[in-house]
Every structure is written in structure tokens, then in C-alpha cells.
Image (cartoon, helix red, strand yellow):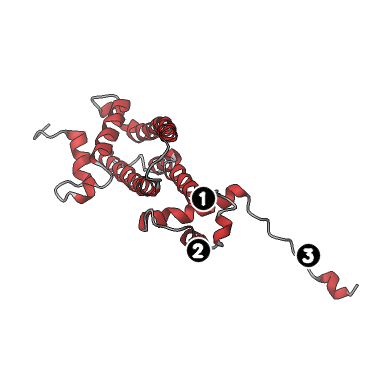
Amino acid sequence: MDSNDQDQPVRKRARGMSVEERRAMIVQAALPLLAEVGPSVTTLQIARAAGISEPTIFRAFADKNEVLQACLEEVTDPEHIAVELNAIDTDSSLEERLVELIEAIQAQGKRTGAVLNAIRLASPPNPNLNEMKDRQAAFHRKWVERYAAVHAAVCGVLEPDEPRLRISVSDMATLVLSIVFSLGRNAVAEQESITTKQLADLLLNGALKGA
């Protein structure tokens, strides 16, 4: 063997992605496309965004619908919103924290809405009724679990000012989430007469002058 060959470093082959890692990569590439393109997004577009070939998608997912379902699981994962809420500076004022909280929840709602709308429009026109009921039941169970996680994160944002509140932190968190959810994901942003700051002020101080 040539001495020069002995001096050459041994190249290690890069570890290939696991199926779960490949699925996660595809989902991350698909989410912005769903928000931008909607249900008409193709697996070819997703593959290009992920930097892979289209057949690679089908080594991780059975079909496009399964990709959409995985996107829904990802975008509704309560861990994402919990991380955002936990990052809010507890040294800032309650008013400032509440504004950040509302904006974070609305942003999450916008992301979730885009994926939900894409799945709804991409679903078969005449779905199997039993299958549809099963999906609705599963989604409801997951929604209850995710709401509980988000509610706990909101409580964490409010807790430093618990002595100032006329109601419990838990009730205040429920009130905030109920109002923000009922307004819809774009309501405050689209209504020029209502700003996020005004909504936060209303939640904290009410509608009466000098309240």
C-alpha cells in the first residue's frame, strides 16, 4: 500500500435520515406552502421545497392526504404555543404580557386555520360517514388535551400578577382564550377600530370610564 494512501483520512458515510426525520423535514417544508398556496399545493412542490425528489415523499407518507394530516398534527402541537408563551418576559408589565399573549395565540390560530382549510378543501366530496365521525371524535379529544396545555401556559403568563386580579388566574386564562378564540384568528388585525392593545386594556380594565 502506498504511504500516501495511509495518510489519507478515512471518510465516513453520512448517516441517512430515519423515516421520522424525513417525515418531519417534509412537514416543515409543506407548512409554509399550505399557508401560501392552500389545498392545491402538490407533492412535487413540497418535494422541491424540501430539496428532495417527489418519490422520496412517498417513502415517508402513503399519499398527499397523509402529509396534510401530519401537517395538522404539527401545527396544532401545543408545545409550540407553550414555548412562545413561556418566552414572554415576566418582568414586563401585565398589560405588555397580555398583548404578547394575544398576538401569539392569534398567530398560532392563523397557522392552524391555513392547514385546517387546506385539509377541508382537499378532502373527498363524499367521505365515509363512519370515518368522518371517527376523525371528528379524535380531533375533539386532541383539542381538549391541547386546550388544557395552552390554558396552563396562559396561566403561567398571568400568575406573577395574581394578587392584582379580581378573579382567579385560571378563570382569567379561560376568559382570555374564550374572547380571543371567539373573535377569530384575524378579527383584531382586520378591524381598524380594535387593536390588540385595546383588547388587552378591555380585558384588564373593562369598558366603563374610570373602572
Where residue 48 is drawn, which disc sits there? Answer: 2
Residue linked to disc 3: 10
195 or 50: nearer the viewer: 50
Q: Position of residue 11 (x, y in %)?
A: 75, 64
Mark nearest the camera among 1 and 3 is: 1
Task: Name, please, the residue furthest toward the left.
Answer: 209
Bin the neighbour count of mark 1 within 10 Å (Cα to Cα): few under 14, some 14-19, many 20 and up.
few
Pick the residue in front: 43 or 177: 43
Mark 1 touches mark 3? (CB < 8 Å): no
Marks 1 and 3, Cα distance to the nearest angstrom?
40 Å
User: Can you tell which of label 2 and label 1 is closer to the viewer?
Assistant: 1
Q: What residue sits right under mark 1 in the picture?
A: 63
Question: In the picture shown, does residue 119 fall above or below 173?
Answer: below
Labels 2 and 1: the sequence-earlier one: 2
* Quadrant in which residue 149 is drawn: top left
N-term-proximal mark, 3 vs 2: 3
Bin the neighbour count of mark 3 within 10 Å (Cα to Cα): few under 14, some 14-19, many 20 and up.
Answer: few
Compared to residue 101, the image places residue 34 above or below, namely below
Instruction: Name the amino acid, label 1.
Output: Asp
Marks 2/1 in contact by CB < 8 Å: the verdict is: no
Residue 189 coordinates in the image, percent (x, y): 23, 50
Identified by mark 2, the residue type is Arg
Q: Residue at x 51, y 50 (%)?
A: 63
Closer to the camera in the image, 197 or 139:
139
Q: CA distance from mark 2 to mark 1?
A: 16 Å
Q: Is residue 41 left or right of residue 163?
A: right
Vertical order, 1 against 137 (above or below)? below
How many other residues sit within 10 Å of disc 2, few (<14), some (14-19) or many (≥20)?
some
